């Protein structure tokens, strides 16, 4: 079940990251295009919140792998 959810979650997480980065670049880097700073800042904020929530869900769904690979805690064997 986790794999099905992660197949949807991971691309959404990547898209949220890209939107956050692009909005930050459009807000910070002066160029010949003029963007409304308030709108771009709001997009950056909302995309950042979405990214954070999706990242927490991603860690939750991958917690067993994180425990085994990072902390060295092996899952208990079922009898």
Image: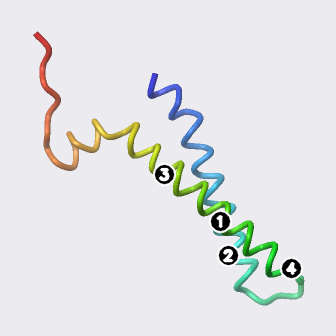
Residue of label 2: 24
Residue under the point 67% across and 62% down:
46
In the picture shown, does residue 31 fall above or below 3?
A: below
Residue of label 3: 55
Residue under the point 45% across and 50% down:
56
Residue 42, percent from left and from top: 74, 70
Image quadrant assignment for residue 44 = bottom right
Residue of label 4: 35
Mark 3 and mark 4: Cα distance apart in space: 28 Å
Q: Residues within 10 Å of mark 3 (few under 14, many from 20)?
A: some
Task: Tell me which label, 1 or 3, sits earlier in the chain.
Answer: 1
Task: Tell me which label, 3 or 4, sits earlier in the chain.
Answer: 4
Image quadrant assignment for residue 58 = top left
Mark 2 and mark 3: Cα distance apart in space: 19 Å
Residue of label 1: 20
Where disc 1 sits, the SS reads helix
Q: Residues within 10 Å of mark 2 (few under 14, many from 20)?
A: some
Task: Tell me which label, 4 or 1, sits earlier in the chain.
Answer: 1
* Residues at marks 1 and 2 touching, judged by CB atoms closer than 8 Å: yes
Where disc 4 sits, the SS reads loop
């Amino acid at each position: 079940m986790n794999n099905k959810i992660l197949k949807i979650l991971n691309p959404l997480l990547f898209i949220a990251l890209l939107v956050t980065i692009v909005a930050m670049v459009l807000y910070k880097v002066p160029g010949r295009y003029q963007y409304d700073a308030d709108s771009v800042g709001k997009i950056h904020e909302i995309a950042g919140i979405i990214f954070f929530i999706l990242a927490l869900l991603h860690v939750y769904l991958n917690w067993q792998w994180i425990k085994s690979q990072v902390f060295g805690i092996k899952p208990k064997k079922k009898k």
